[in-house]
Amino acid sequence: MHKGKILLLTLILFVFSAGNSFAQSEPDYQTALAEFQKGNSEKALEIIRVLHEQGKRSYDTHYLAAFCHYNAGRNKSAATHWSEALKLKPGDPAVSVDFARYLIQAGRNSDALEIIYNSYQINPKNREVRLLYATALLYNNKAREALYIIEKLKAEDGNDYRPLVLEAQVYFYLGSAEKAEVSLKWAQSLVPNNPNVLNNLGLVYEKVGNQEAKRGNIKKALEQLRNAKEQLESALKLKPDDEKIKGNIRRIEARINALSAG
């Protein structure tokens, strides 16, 4: 899967909307939710633990507990609560998307595919579910199936850059840097200052540069690698603390220096 090359930066972002995701019928739950919204995740968890001890487990309490644990870096505990929430609402799109994103981030690609596929069967028209389903397919080496879903997503909304970024990742995986560049350039026209798009475009140029170097075309290779560095430096200006982007720049600089030295 070209790990370390393809960055799922645009897609590893959890979509938590406290105002709409949770029911409004449980006053005690509302207290926990209010604490979470104020940034008091541990206080919210204390309230949820009491509710669970009282036998008041619900989809809402488990979903909220998952985010409290995730915010505290306790990913395994978060995963446990996402799983419990899905037992109470099988295929729920909000939980399925968040849980699948986490599983992909953790490298549990087959588990992610199972979770999001179950939701896709129940919610076949949900755009977020379909986008994550295509992502999970790609990370399970089912690139052609992912492309089929991506094409439909693109046709339905030409202003959504995310399917284009995912399409570029698919083409990158399939070895077509040229097609990946076209997709990313299209995405860039929609979101000119998106650091993740710029980063991925830099990785595409890096791949092309390395291909040219293997062919012995050092001049073309250096041109592509300098283009890659330029894109990555633009990305870093927008996201100055991103260590992955910094690492990509260092790697490309080293490659440029090595080729320049002959």
Image: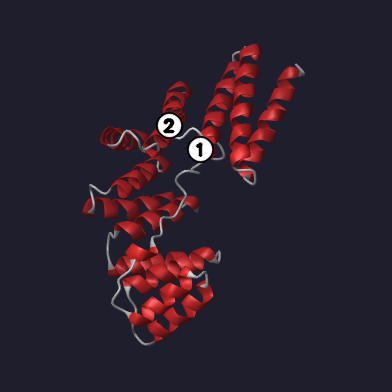
Residue 59 versus residue 235 in the image, above or below: below
**Residue 148 picture location, percent across and down:** 29, 34
**Residue 85 picture location, percent across and down:** 34, 68
**Residue 149 picture location, percent across and down:** 29, 38
Q: Is residue 233 left or right of residue 147?
A: right
Q: Return the residue at label 1.
A: 194
Q: What whole-number distance in Å separates the C-alpha atoms at marks 2 and 1?
A: 9 Å
Q: Is residue 216 visible?
A: no
Split into 4 quadrants, where in the image is the C terminus?
top right
Task: Report the residue at 58% width, 36% height from top.
Answer: 235
Q: Is residue 29 visible?
A: yes
Q: Return the residue at label 2.
A: 187
Return the residue nearer the eye: 102 or 2. 102
Return the residue nearer the eye: 260 or 173. 260
Residue lying at the far right in this picture: please name it.
261
User: Is tag 2's residue or tag 1's residue first in the polypeptide sequence?
Assistant: 2
Return the residue nearer the eye: 99 or 187. 187
Return the residue nearer the eye: 226 or 172. 226
Residue 262 versus residue 8 in the image, above or below: above
Task: Report the residue at 53% width, 27% height from top.
Answer: 204
Task: Report the residue at 37% width, 78% height from top.
Answer: 29
Q: Residue type at mark 1?
A: Asn
Residue 211 versus residue 44 in the image, above or below: above
SS for tag 2?
A: helix
Q: Residue type at mark 2?
A: Ala
